[in-house]
Image (tube, rainbow, N blue to C red):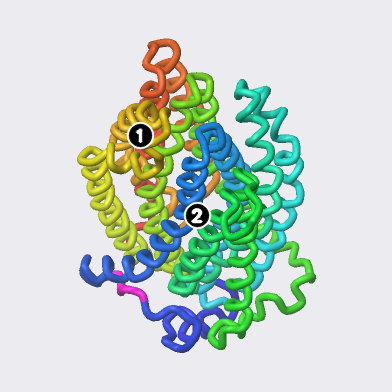
């Protein structure tokens, strides 16, 4: 602990004043008390993640109404954007445990320093990654996609790539505000973004309200505009809110901080590669699904959107676990850390069981939301989508467990070994299993998703073992 940190702990870690988190559950508190503390923090985060996913679901639904080829292109374009985004978002995600740990130590300066350097790294990454979007057409063709889908995908990605920087900056500010337990503003700003995105989509995809009909390009423009407005709103709040302005987040923003930059980079790069290992597995299945057929690819996109919606619930709880464990870790409170972890895992598993029941009980109505039944291809897409959603039910518990374990490990700033576990689980187990079952065993689309189940299950087991074998025990 840095000199003077103990004297500041009463000001930061346990204060009830404006801008700072209220007291966390005492390590010896009851399980319900820990659950209430976790949900109070996690529910708005779940809501904000669901709202963020609603942006992509809105695009999928509206472009699905526009045409099957357009839908396949946006599925590829949006998933490709996400693969690039998720690597850079590691720096933003590193901000959350660093800020939470600084609060646990009572170190206000570290809160500001970690967030600023997260913003710096996000801008640099956004600039460096844009050429991938500009030349995305040849990349998609090289991956075996049909020429029409590749051309439309490039049209989408050239515009959407311009939103990489604001999207990453939004992630940094969300991590900063969440660690300060300002999760309500994160939720409501994201919800407002959904409304803006839907309205601009309606105008620009279909040419409504006198706007030009731009199809997939209209969807991309709507996404970039929404990301820019969301960043502006969060930045104004972080800079001007009376309870937060004391951090002086943007004051002398141009000043380099090599020590903080190195900390964010060292923690964030493994987080980014961990997320990339998982998301690229899903992206690879999308590419292979394109080899099977356009109908299968469209159904894959729909089923994946639905599975991702339930996954966002677990991501929100995982974020809450990162913040709570990070606070206890910074305060060197082993008892509170372990209890916070146990409660977070229990909550995530309970919600995972609800998702399994939902997917098994009503797959057809869920898939039908994304389809225009008047189009001749819809019946075929529905049949494949229902089968894939049944497969999605199989990996709900494993998916919940692996993302929760990652959140707990990030709270104690353990990211390098989890990165190795993720790479091995997804690419040494999941990918060979998916390819072998789909094409070697002849199971097609179902085989690809069974491979996902295998990779996620191995990751969940190893990551949970990593956290609980290393979590500090009370003296």
Q: Is residue 188 visible?
A: yes
In front of the other: 305 or 318? 305
Q: Position of residue 202 (x, y in %)?
A: 53, 55
Query: Is the residue marked by circle 2 packed among few (<14), some (14-19), or many (20+) residues within 10 Å?
Result: many
Give the magenta part as a residue range.
24-28
The image shows residue 457, relative to residue 52, as above or below, that is above
Q: Which mark is residue 396?
A: none
- Could you tell me how far apart the alpha carbons at marks 1 and 2 are, in whole angstroms? 28 Å
Q: Is residue 251 left or right of residue 25?
A: right
In front of the other: 9 or 152? 152
Question: Which of the two marks, 1 or 2, is nearer to us in this view?
Answer: 2
Residue identifier under label 1: 457
Q: Which mark is residue 55?
A: 2
Query: Is the residue marked by circle 1 packed among few (<14), some (14-19), or many (20+) residues within 10 Å?
Result: many
Residue in the picture at 39% in, 32% down:
378
Q: Is residue 420 visible?
A: no
Hey, which residue is sitting farthest front in the picture?
A: 210
Q: Is residue 88 left or right of residue 363?
A: right
The local secondary structure at tag 2 comes to helix
Q: Position of residue 420 (x, y in %)?
A: 52, 37
Q: Quarter of the image holding residue 383?
A: top left
The image shows residue 468, relative to residue 48, as above or below, that is above
Q: Position of residue 179 (x, y in %)?
A: 49, 69
The image shows residue 436, relative to residue 264, as above or below, that is above
Residue in the picture at 55% in, 48% down:
271
The number of numbered badges drawn on the structure is: 2
Residue in the picture at 59% in, 58% down:
92
Q: Quadrant of the C terminus?
A: bottom left
- Tell me which label, 1 or 2, sits earlier in the chain: 2
Q: Position of residue 308 (x, y in %)?
A: 41, 45
Q: Quadrant of the N terminus?
A: bottom right
Residue 341 belongs to magenta span:
no
């Amino acid at each position: 602990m840095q000199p003077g940190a103990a004297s500041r702990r009463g000001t930061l870690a346990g204060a009830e004043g404006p801008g700072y988190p209220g007291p966390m559950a005492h390590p010896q508190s009851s399980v319900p008390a820990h659950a209430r503390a976790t949900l109070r923090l996690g529910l708005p985060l779940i809501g904000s993640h669901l709202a963020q996913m609603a942006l992509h679901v809105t695009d999928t639904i509206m472009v699905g109404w526009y045409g099957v080829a357009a839908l396949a292109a946006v599925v590829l374009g949006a998933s490709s954007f996400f693969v690039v985004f998720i690597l850079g978002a590691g720096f933003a995600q590193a901000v959350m445990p660093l800020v939470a740990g600084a609060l646990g130590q009572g170190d206000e300066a570290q809160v500001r320093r970690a967030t600023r350097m997260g913003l710096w790294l996000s801008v640099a990454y956004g600039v460096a990654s844009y050429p991938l979007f500009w030349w995305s057409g040849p990349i998609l063709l090289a991956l075996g996609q049909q020429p029409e889908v590749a051309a439309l995908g490039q049209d989408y990605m050239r515009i959407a790539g311009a939103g990489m920087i604001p999207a990453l900056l939004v992630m940094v500010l969300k991590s900063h505000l969440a660690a300060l337990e300002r999760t309500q503003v994160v939720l409501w700003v994201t919800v407002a973004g959904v409304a803006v995105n839907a309205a601009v989509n309606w105008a620009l995809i279909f040419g409504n309200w006198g706007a030009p009909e731009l199809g997939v390009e209209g969807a991309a423009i709507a996404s970039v505009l929404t990301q820019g407005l969301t960043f502006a709103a969060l930045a104004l709040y972080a800079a001007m809110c009376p309870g937060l302005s004391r951090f002086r987040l943007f004051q002398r923003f141009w000043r380099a901080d090599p020590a903080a930059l190195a900390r964010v980079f060292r923690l964030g790069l493994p987080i980014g590669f961990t997320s990339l290992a998982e998301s690229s597995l899903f992206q690879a299945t999308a590419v292979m699904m394109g080899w099977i057929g356009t109908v299968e690819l469209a159904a894959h996109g729909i089923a994946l959107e639905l599975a991702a919606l339930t996954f966002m619930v677990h991501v929100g709880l995982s974020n809450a676990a990162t913040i709570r464990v990070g606070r206890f870790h910074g305060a060197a409170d082993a008892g509170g850390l372990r209890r916070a972890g146990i409660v977070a895992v229990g909550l995530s598993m309970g919600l995972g069981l609800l998702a399994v029941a939902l997917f098994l009980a009503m797959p057809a109505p869920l898939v039908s939301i994304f389809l225009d039944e008047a189009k001749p291809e819809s019946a075929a897409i529905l049949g494949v989508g229902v089968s894939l959603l049944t497969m999605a039910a199989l990996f709900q518990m494993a998916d919940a467990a692996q993302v929760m374990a990652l959140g707990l490990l990030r709270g104690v700033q353990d990211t390098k070994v989890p990165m190795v576990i993720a790479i091995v689980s997804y690419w040494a187990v999941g990918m060979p299993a998916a390819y072998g079952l789909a094409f070697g065993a002849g199971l097609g689309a179902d085989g690809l998703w069974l491979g996902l189940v295998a990779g996620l299950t191995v990751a969940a087991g190893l990551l949970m073992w990593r956290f609980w074998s290393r979590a500090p025990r009370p003296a």
